Amino acid sequence: MSSAKRSTPPSRGGSAPAPGVDPDLVRDGLAALSDLATAGVEIDGEIQVAESTWAIYGHISYDGEIMVGEYHDAAVAAEILRAAPHPRPDVRRTE
């Protein structure tokens, strides 16, 4: 995944999604990532994998970097990542 564009969106504070972002998509994506985080996946960042496809990736101890969510809207992916649980914010990448 290292050749694609990576980003870590800034925190806007509050819990409302950005204007124009479907809150149901954010809620559902966040629920899925929360389940993964509870199982031990460290949610790490967002990556553009194609012109219209964004993914959220994380790390697990035995496989390393893995994709944990795929979205066709960059704003939705950014909102989900912004709200996702980050048990160790000091290890979030900004590459």
Image (spheres, grey):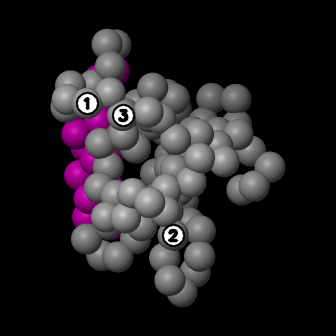
Q: Is residue 47 visible?
A: no
Indicate the secondary structure of the residue bearing disc 3. Answer: loop
Residue topped by disc 1: 13
For the residue marked with disc 2, what is the amino acid?
A: His
Q: Position of residue 11 (x, y in %)?
A: 36, 34
Q: Using residue 30 as the reference point, say whether residue 69 is left or right of it.
A: right
User: In the image shown, does 59 or 86 lie closer to the viewer?
Assistant: 86
Q: Which residue appears at 29% of the width and 42% of the height? A: 83
Inter-mark Cα distance, 1 to 2? 25 Å
Tell me, for residue 86, which label it has, or none.
none
Q: Is residue 48 visible?
A: yes
Task: Tell me if mark 2 has few (under 14), some (14-19) or many (20+) residues whose alpha carbon lies within 10 angstroms of its own.
Answer: some
For the residue marked with disc 1, what is the amino acid?
A: Gly
**Residue 35 counted in the magenta span:** yes
Residues in magenta, as a range:
21-36
Inter-mark Cα distance, 3 to 2? 21 Å
Residue farthest to the front? 90
Given contact means CB atoms under 8 Å apart, are the residues at marks 3 and 2 in contact? no
Residue farthest to the left? 15
Query: Nearer the viewer's eye, disc 1 or disc 2?
Result: 1
Residue topped by disc 3: 11
Given contact means CB atoms under 8 Å apart, are the residues at marks 3 and 1 in contact? yes
Q: Position of residue 31 (x, y in %)?
A: 23, 52
- Magenta highlight: main SS: helix
User: In the image shown, does 49 or 19 lie closer to the viewer?
Assistant: 19
Mark closest to the chain's N terminus, 1 or 2: 1
Residue topped by disc 2: 59
Residue farthest to the right? 3
**Residue 1 counted in the magenta span:** no
Task: Tell me if mark 3 has few (under 14), some (14-19) or many (20+) residues whose alpha carbon lies within 10 angstroms of its own.
Answer: few
Q: Which residue appears at 80% of the width and 49% of the height? A: 3
